[in-house]
Amino acid sequence: MSEPTHIRRVDQRPLREAISTRGRSIIPGLTKDDLIKYFFGGNAWISMVVLGLIMLSLFSQSIGLNPFAGFFGQDYRNQLAYRQSGLEFVDIIKKQAADLDDLGQYLSAARLQELKRLLAQGKNQGKTEDQSLADANAVLAPFDEYAGKLSGFGDGLGDIISNLGDTAKSTKTALKTLEDRKAEKQLYLSVGKKDLADKVTYQEVDLVAAVQPLKAALPSIHDASAKLASDLTNFIAQPPPSVDENMKDHLAGFNSRAQALITAIPDYQKQLDNWDPTVPLPWYAGVTDFFFNIKWQTASSWQNYYGIWPLLIGSMLISIVALAIAVPLGVGAGVYINQIATPWEQNLVKPAIEFISAIPSVVLGFFGVAVLGESLRQLSRWGFLPEFSERLNVMTAGVLLAFMAVPTIFTLTEDAINNVPRSFKEASYALGANRLQTIWRIILPAALSGVISAVLLGFGRVIGETMVVLLCAGNRIAIPPMSDGLMILFQPVHTMTGIIAQELGEAENGSIEWRALFMVGLLLFLISLVINFMAQRVVQKYKISIG
Amino acid sequence: MKKILTLTLATALSICSVQADSTLVIKGSDTLGAKLVPQLAEAYKASHPGVSFSIAAEGSTTGIAAIIDGTADIGMASRRAFDTEVSAAGANGRTLKPTIVAYDGIAVIVNSANSVSALNKKQIEGIFTGTIKDWSEVGGKPGAISIYTRNTSSGTYSDFAKMAMGGNNYAETAQKMAGNEEIASEVGKNSAGVGYVGMAYLNASGVKSVAVNGVKPTISTVQNHSYPLSRSTFYYTNGPATGEAASFLAFTISPAGQKIVQAVGFAPLK
């Protein structure tokens, strides 16, 4: 045991201090070391702060720091005004008229079917298109005369609807004006212009008097409904004189529908009799409107609804299509490039795929509008795809988004496969497995967690994409009818990202539309957050330990 | 895109003319800002060297909001300001003053291959509210109608609902397009399409306008309001316009300016 060597230093300070504080500090009280630490730490934390600020602003613009002034509060008042003004009452009558319209549309659909049959007949007889259209219309003339009577049956109800609708709308406007005035006064007071605030006067709306005309109209509604029932009964008792067999089937279908309407009329009447504008709304009315309503309807002069479903389903449909295409392509390409490809192929294909992500999405969007949409429609005309009419639809947008998601999925998949320990592969070969068996049974399962997170991040890329869906999705705010089966993939939809981009620029600052759009943004943000969180969890939880 | 393009162009122009004495900032309606105002600006610059323009066409609401916030000299609008906007301006110490600069007819357009060339208001209402679903119901060849409209916060969207649809809601199947040009191009490519655009967009390829209640949208029918779907377009300013803005406004409603209004496809003031 020798004595520990003692090094004599000129600097007598402890070693640690001597290293860390060479030179004098610029700011008193902080060593240079501290400054470097704070510089890097600040850079790391600034992104956290920005993220926090974004979340805070999203939250305050949507739900609001004061929920009564935020979206849910505004939507609650929006729905309360709907009930108090009596629009709800008029909507019950409207429902009745809408049922009648449906009957009319049933006849129109029957006529269309007949017309198509007659046109086909005319074509076989060698008539020109215009000639056979004229002839077919002539043949259908008695039917048209018959069906034309139907539209007159709604006139009685129509007059009542338009009168009462005007009354209810003006009450709603009065309620809106009242709210605006109160807000205006608040605004003036908040900027300290008391003189202007004093000039703002308003009067509370007398809600009892406002719905009086609606209640008073009950007997005349009853009469109009009764007349509608008797008209319909007479109508189905006298079918048009000359109808062929096909038409008879249609008319039989019509009769049963008309009967259903006639029996439903007393129910409507009961609803009207029992309607009460003072029934309170549940406090969560705004919440249910956003999360459970299937209608998104804004800028309506009647009533606005802010149900997220049409937009959510649109975004989801497009994402599903995109992933269905991008996952096999991206994962397949990743496996091939990492495991099978020659170095020459690797050097060519890998940068090429990664280059795709450098294409601006607006360029892809233009490509979709100008080329892809039309090409897909052409393919359907030639019979390679089922027939559809709108060229901007889920498929057009989905195909382009798949193209955009491929680089993300490809790169991450390749990384995941790279992370599989070499020993796994070698052990597999040692046991006599061939290359494909090794890839399929050993490497892919070992990299599965990475692949799944790659797919999830690809999903995040797709659902947040805006430009392509705005240009190529067709922007129809309606849930595609599920009865169409897979054909819903060829229907236009609107998306959560698209509606924000399209409407926010023109929405009045702080209005309910504005806040509803921020609600959509908040939801989108949460979805992305969950996806990213899941992607991280999957990787951590199922990581294969080396050795 | 067009808007971004306009912006970029405006920025590029303003960078080019560094020695410009003043820049007029104009924001607002897509209907006015896409074609008419840029052309007026070009003509104005010819007679007033040294003035540069920054024009952004992102919808009437942005134009009025820009006047309220004081971020523009002129706000273009295809509708009048709402009460809430008037009071918001008051709170900021500004007053919104509208000046009518041109009349615009909203034309209902169909594909030029469509045999339908006239519709009455009731039929238009039926088509856009979704109760009429097939062209054969209005005398055309069978084919499901595809409806193209503007986006919902656009001034034209609500104007059309008020003027042509009795204030009823649009059909759910309507597709919301970003601007007049997009509507015209979709209708031009879809033989079963129907939509509406400002009169200035009628010469797009593959579309034709239909007569409404027997009246075709032309400059004279819009001027005398016999075309049912006519409306006014506005410049909004903070109080009476001053300085360069006043002189541009005067130029717009002068005979020379109104000539351009007519050339672009709007109806000039009488």
Image: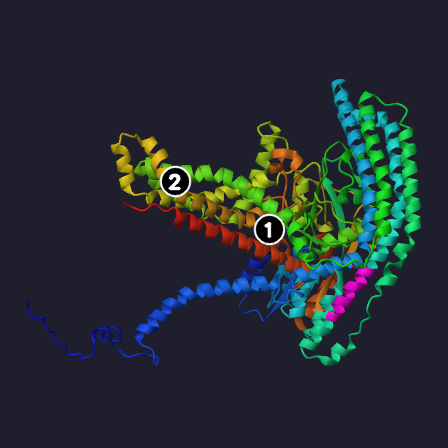
Front-most of A431 and A134? A431
Query: Residue A437: where, in percent of width, then height?
Result: 34, 31
Question: SS at mark 1?
Answer: helix
Q: Which mark is residue A108?
A: none
Q: Residues within 10 Å of mark 1 (few under 14, many from 20)?
A: many
Along the viewing direction, whichever of A295 and B101 lies nearer the viewer = A295
- The magenta region covers A171-182
Please determine whether, in this image, residue A198 is positioned above or below residue B264.
below
Q: CA distance from mark 1 to mark 2?
A: 31 Å
* Placement of the C terminus of chain B among the 4 image quadrants: bottom right
Spot occupied by residue A503 in the image (x, y as percentages of width and height): 64, 55
Total numbered badges shown on the rendered structure:
2
Q: Which residue corresponds to mark 2?
A: A334
Left or right placement of residue A353 versus residue A111 in this view: left
Left or right of residue B43: residue A356: left
Where is residue A387, by image quadrant?
top right
Q: Where is mark 1, residue-wise?
A: A496
In the visual, does B238 lie left or right of A374?
right
Q: Chain of mark 2?
A: A
Q: Residues within 10 Å of mark 2 (few under 14, many from 20)?
A: many
User: Can residue B34 be found in the magenta stretch?
Assistant: no
> Which residue: 85% across, 34% down?
A259
Tell me: residue A142, above or below residue B5. above
